[in-house]
Image (tube, rainbow, N blue to C red):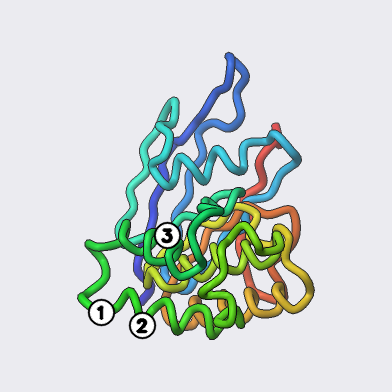
Amino acid sequence: MSEVLLRASDVGYEVDGSRLFHELDLVVRSSEMVEVRGANASGKSTLLKCLAGLIRPASGAVAVHDQFAYLGHRAGLSDTLTVRENLRWLLSLCQGQLRAGEAESGIEDAVARLEIGHLLGRAVASLSAGQRRRVALAGVLASRARLWLLDEPLTALDEAGVALLTGELRRHLNNGGGVVAATHLALGPLPARTVQLGES
């Protein structure tokens, strides 16, 4: 039986008196992916930040029932640190959900799956936009979180990167994880429920 990983009830948000969304209800269960769609400025990124607890909705409530990993539109990496140092720092934020030794093994496994193991010693400043995105996604994989909140995860990825991400999403869902992704494009041939923002 599927588990509820996240529940949002009557959630609304306004910017300068303009309503982005209101009375939004969302339940995300294990092995389920939800794609948040909408035009630019419709509130996709804002909704993900509300779900992640980064900003407070103007109304309603959000309850997350398991560990989650959030990846914003920007990668959130330090240019001056190496890939490994960035991933270690990201996973230091997950100390409550990783057992001793899991961080390093998680990093090795994630970079191998996303085919960026050869970049571990390089400074992020030297990477392309697509490589940076793979590094940020590796942090999500290595966190071992059951719920992924992803803002435009396909940004800057080439065809090979998209294929790798699609495979990891499928694997995560098959293992009982859940995904909420704000996206302009369908995330591959994966079954997903759609939440459309910007409609009256």
Q: Residues within 10 Å of mark 1 (few under 14, many from 20)?
A: few
> Label 3 to label 1, Cα distance in Å?
19 Å
Q: Are marks 1 and 2 in contact (CB under 8 Å)?
A: yes
Amino acid type, mark 3: Ala
Residue 69: numbered disc:
3
Counting residues from the N terminus, which is met first, the one under dot 2 or under dot 3? Answer: 3
Residue 72: numbered disc:
none
- Disc tally is 3
The N terminus is located in which quarter? bottom left
Q: Nearer the viewer, residue 177 or 138?
A: 138
Q: Residues within 10 Å of mark 2 (few under 14, many from 20)?
A: few
Q: Is residue 53 left or right of residue 17?
A: left
Q: Tell me the residue at 73%/60% (across/down).
A: 156
Query: Where residue 189 appears, x then y in whole percent?
Result: 71, 76
Note whether 98 is above or below 118 in the view shown.
above
Residue 101: numbered disc:
1
Amino acid type, mark 2: Ser
Check the image and name the residue furthest to the right.
Answer: 159
Q: Is residue 124 left or right of residue 128?
A: left
Query: Where residue 22 appears, x then y in whole percent?
Result: 54, 31
Between circles 3 and 1, the one closer to the viewer is: 1
Amino acid type, mark 1: Gly
Q: Tell me the residue at 47%/62% (across/down).
A: 148
Q: Are marks 3 and 1 in contact (CB under 8 Å)?
A: no
Residue 105: numbered disc:
2
